[in-house]
Image: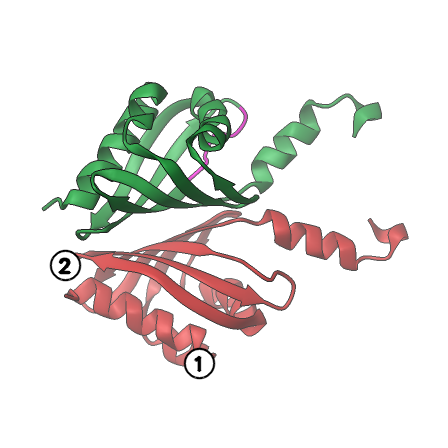
Chain colours: A red, B green
Amino acid sequence: MTTKALDTALAYHRAWTAHDFERAMTHVAEDVVCDAPAGRIEGAAAFRDFMGPFTRLVTGSTLIAAFGDDRTALLMYDTRTVPVDHAPGSECVTVHDGLITHIRIVFDRAPFDAARQAALAPGQR
Amino acid sequence: MTTKALDTALAYHRAWTAHDFERAMTHVAEDVVCDAPAGRIEGAAAFRDFMGPFTRLVTGSTLIAAFGDDRTALLMYDTRTVPVDHAPGSECVTVHDGLITHIRIVFDRAPFDAARQAALAPGQR
């Protein structure tokens, strides 16, 4: 059974995992607040700058679990990305009037940091 | 509304966040499989060695969202820990006959790695 919040969260999720980030953004409120591992991101433009580049690195994804009620949806998924083979994430999404107003993202930055370090020439590390 | 899987996941969660890890382990199957950021952990003894030390570092926690169906529960929470002030995590838990048989944990290792590095004397880094 899906709920309104879950419908919106899944529509957003399906769009970005299908590399249609602009369609994904149609489900995101202009004043969205995103709590990500590196800190808080405010507004759709800043969110686009954060999430857009990541979605372009995604080569595959699997939805592990998704639940929700009228206001909140909670998703866990796995992604394969260019720098990191196995990058699971979880999102808790708040939906208001059909748009995502808050999104809390949990994922492990450590393998991305390690891939970035490995890609640098020794003198740059 | 809680479900069987969510009841079990919440009982486990409440016990370890209340620093009663032994009570938490009564909800975990002997042959539990845990997929954590660093890789797969198999069996209750190995899981205890992984999760137990973390729970002793926790100084506070907040449940952000929790959902489930008959078999699966999905939780997101925030924790305050001794080395890292703000360490959110998410768990997808599979329950069979009232015991957790599989648990997938997503959290950000980066601030824990940074805290460990910062705690080392310069010569050990």
Image position of A95 with respect to B69: above or below:
below
Q: Foreground residue, A28 or B25? A: B25
Indicate left or right for A81 with A95 as reference.
right
- Which three-letter amino acid code belongs to the residue tagged 2? Asp
Crowd around label 1: few <14 · some 14–19 · many ≥20 (10 Å): some
Mark 2 or 1 closer to N-term?
A: 1
Indicate left or right for B113 with B96 as reference.
right
Is residue B84 found inside the magenta-colored segment of the image?
yes
Q: Single out the residue that lies furthest toward the left.
A: B1
Cα–Cα gap, marks 2 and 1? 25 Å
Q: Foreground residue, B30 or A30? A: B30
The quarter of the rendered structure image containing the C terminus of chain B is: top right
Asked if both marks, 2 and 1, belong to the same chain, the answer given is yes
Which residue is at 21% across, 45% downward? Answer: B5
The local secondary structure at tag 2 comes to loop
| Mark 2 in CB contact with mark 1 (< 8 angstroms) | no
Residue A97, x across and y down, in percent: 18, 67
Crowd around label 2: few <14 · some 14–19 · many ≥20 (10 Å): some
Residue A79, x across and y down, in percent: 49, 64
Indicate left or right for A27 with A113 as reference.
left
Indicate left or right for B95 with B122 as reference.
left
- Which three-letter amino acid code belongs to the residue tagged 1? Asp
Residue B44, x across and y down, in percent: 42, 32
Disc 2: which residue: A70
Residue stretch rendered in magenta on the structure? B83-88
- Chain letter of the residue beneath label 1 in the structure image: A
The disc placed on residue A20 is 1
How many callouts does the rendering have? 2
